[in-house]
Amino acid sequence: MKIVNFGSLNLDYIYRVEHIGGQGETLAASSRDVFCGGKGLNQSIALARAGAKVYHAGCIGEDGSMLLTALEEAGVDCTHVRTLEGPSGHAVIQVEDSGQNAILLFGGANQTMTSGFVDEVLGVFDAGDILLLQNEINLLSEIVDKAYARGLKIALNPSPYNDRLQDVDLNKISIFLLNEVEGEQMTGEREPANILQKLTEQYSGAEIVLTLGEAGALYGCGQRVCRQEAYSVQAVDTTGAGDTFTGYFLASLTEGREIPDCLRLAAKAASIAVTRSGAAPSIPLRAEAELF
Ligand code: RIB
């Protein structure tokens, strides 16, 4: 069984600010860093650091060599990462003193997938393999349809949640991994328990992993519900914490571990990630997460 993550790769421009700027406001940043990010790249690195064998598929621009290097150094198979003319995707991220963020995305090369590339990538994966997706690349519905037809098991992080997801046949998804904001956008419910109930009813048979920040996480599948408490840490930067949780949860699940164990390890890894700056650089190694 192989894991392929068809996902975004972004250069993250991270600005530290006292508070996240509002409409019409001009803010001075106290620092700027450029880190590797993108929900796709972060989740591939989290999978790899958790010990899983993962193949990343996606596109970068001519300015994206540091993204490729970061994936390779983490041990991700980059056979299906293409370098194209034009800019890579990037994100402008404000991080305030509480560690919370606001993210502005520019799609760049992440929005240049073609049907031919989708066929080429999916052609080397088979029934039973796992496909991980987020919502930062184009052709998502086509990728879901083609992967489902080949018998791949599809895990979706519906983030960012927007109208484009309405074109995707979500009945083909086996595992949803999302936060409470995306949960509310999908269901109209605010209470985590209600979000979980609606999703498990609507997508019966699918596994739902709902991350709740400082309140931990919930897992639901059919009538089964598991709760995971968060670990108490001093947050520095929450960027990429959800991606860390996703990668660690999936890696543990594919090892055949019990759901409470998968949730516990993912929560530990995500808790470590929020104590560090940046998305990809904040993702811990497996040994660190185990010892936490
Ligand atoms: O989930 C965090 C990520 O969202 C950042 O790395 C940024 O690139 C955006 O994709």
Image (cartoon, rainbow, N blue to C red):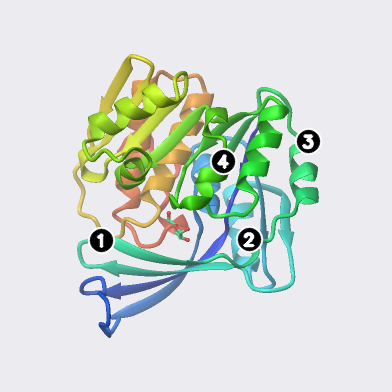
Q: Quick one: 217 or 73, which is closer to the camera?
A: 217
Crowdedness near tag 1: few (<14), some (14–19) or many (≥20) residues, C-alpha within 10 Å: many
Q: Which residue is mark 3?
A: 124
Q: Which residue is mark 2?
A: 111
Residue at the (66%, 42%) spot, across then down: 143
Disc 4 residue lies near ligand 1 with CB under 8 A:
no
Residue at the (62%, 60%) spot, across then down: 110
CA gap, disc 3 to disc 4?
22 Å
Q: What's the mark number on residue 280? A: none
Q: Position of residue 136 (x, y in %)?
A: 54, 55
CA gap, disc 1 to disc 3?
40 Å
Residue at the (21%, 39%) spot, across then down: 215
The image quadrant where one finds the C terminus is top left
How many marks the image carries: the answer is 4
Mark 3 in CB contact with mark 4 (< 8 angstroms): no
Disc 2 residue lies near ligand 1 with CB under 8 A:
no
Amino acid carrying mark 3 in the image: Val
Q: Quick one: 134 or 23, which is closer to the camera?
A: 23
Q: Position of residue 42 (x, y in %)?
A: 50, 51
Q: Quick one: 87 or 35, which is closer to the camera?
A: 87
Crowdedness near tag 4: few (<14), some (14–19) or many (≥20) residues, C-alpha within 10 Å: some
Residue at the (74%, 38%) spot, across then down: 122
Q: Secondary structure at mark 2?
A: helix
Q: Which residue is mark 1?
A: 99
Crowdedness near tag 2: few (<14), some (14–19) or many (≥20) residues, C-alpha within 10 Å: some
Location of residue 61 by image quarter: bottom right
